[in-house]
Amino acid sequence: MLYMTLSMGSFTLADLALKWACEILPTGQVMLILGLGCCALFWSVTQRNQEKAFSRVFFLPAVLLRTFGEAVAVIFIFLALIHSAFTSVAAILQTLPLLMTLISFIFLGEKVGIHRLLAVLVGFVGVLLIIRPGLESFDVFSLYAVLAVVGMSMRDVGSRLSPASISASMLALYGAMTFVVVGLVMMYFGGSKVPSLEASMYLIAMILFASSGSYYATKAMRIGEVSVISPLRYTRLLFGMLVGVFILKEQPDQYMLLGSAIVVMAGLYVLFREQLQHKTQ
């Protein structure tokens, strides 16, 4: 439980460092540096495990789907963090378990009861309260976070469909390589700058917190009970709210708070029903 909580806190701080870095440096340059840092990390893991990083498995449909989804997710997470409220992005990203439940039912043929489907619909109502389309308070940039969740769901479906013989570090390496490619393309159009001392500190913090978040999440999943630690993923929303309010001086309104609560409660209910189903089988 402690490892998962530390993971979510680390990822939140990585997002904050990313947001600040993008205020100083071109987005493509930040993405490239993040990609290079992650590639170095996951490359070292594959080498330690004596895995062959470059092989034909990269071209398997499931691996390509995961890699493409990773690219879509990182592009729109960057854009969402740059242009939208930090608290809003943190809340919308919590809809991933709900979307995955819906995708599993529609495309993967998994059995999903009426209770979980209703919880998914209720959760999406919470998203509508957060972004409020059609109203004056509607933030069009919050749709970037929605598209990021779509990319993340593609990534997770690809991960689920990928052969078990392909390690998680290999899949993560392929995903990090997309950061490098997309970053280079964006740098071609957006240029680059010599990082100042402040920007360099943000970049280092971004890589360190993102790496530690990945490490703690992996540690938690390996030694903890999934039913106990999975709900703690929602602490990322709490950390996001704290960062948004106390560091970035954002002021989430009552609709934002209500929508966030609905999303979290719906996600926890879906998780509860899944665990209940596993126990009865």
Image (cartoon, helix red, strand yellow):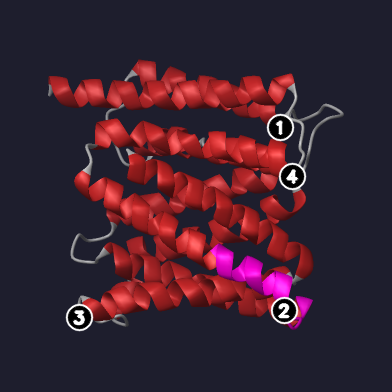
Q: Is residue 167 above or below residue 185?
A: above
Q: Label 2 near label 3: C-beta < 8 Å?
A: no
Q: Residues within 10 Å of mark 3 (few under 14, many from 20)?
A: few
Work out how far the residue at label 3 is from the one at label 2, CA to CA, in angstroms: 35 Å
Residue denoted by label 4:
248
Q: Residues within 10 Å of mark 1 (few under 14, many from 20)?
A: many
Image x and y of residue 162, in percent = 28, 59
Q: Is residue 105 above or below residue 47?
A: above
Work out how far the residue at label 1 is from the one at label 2, CA to CA, in angstroms: 34 Å
Residue denoted by label 1:
131
Residue denoted by label 2:
195
Work out how far the residue at label 3 is from the one at label 4, CA to CA, in angstroms: 43 Å
Q: Residue at x 29, y 54 (%)?
A: 161
On-image quarter of the C terminus: top left
Work out how far the residue at label 1 is from the one at label 3, CA to CA, in angstroms: 46 Å
Q: Residues within 10 Å of mark 4 (few under 14, many from 20)?
A: some
Residue denoted by label 3:
50
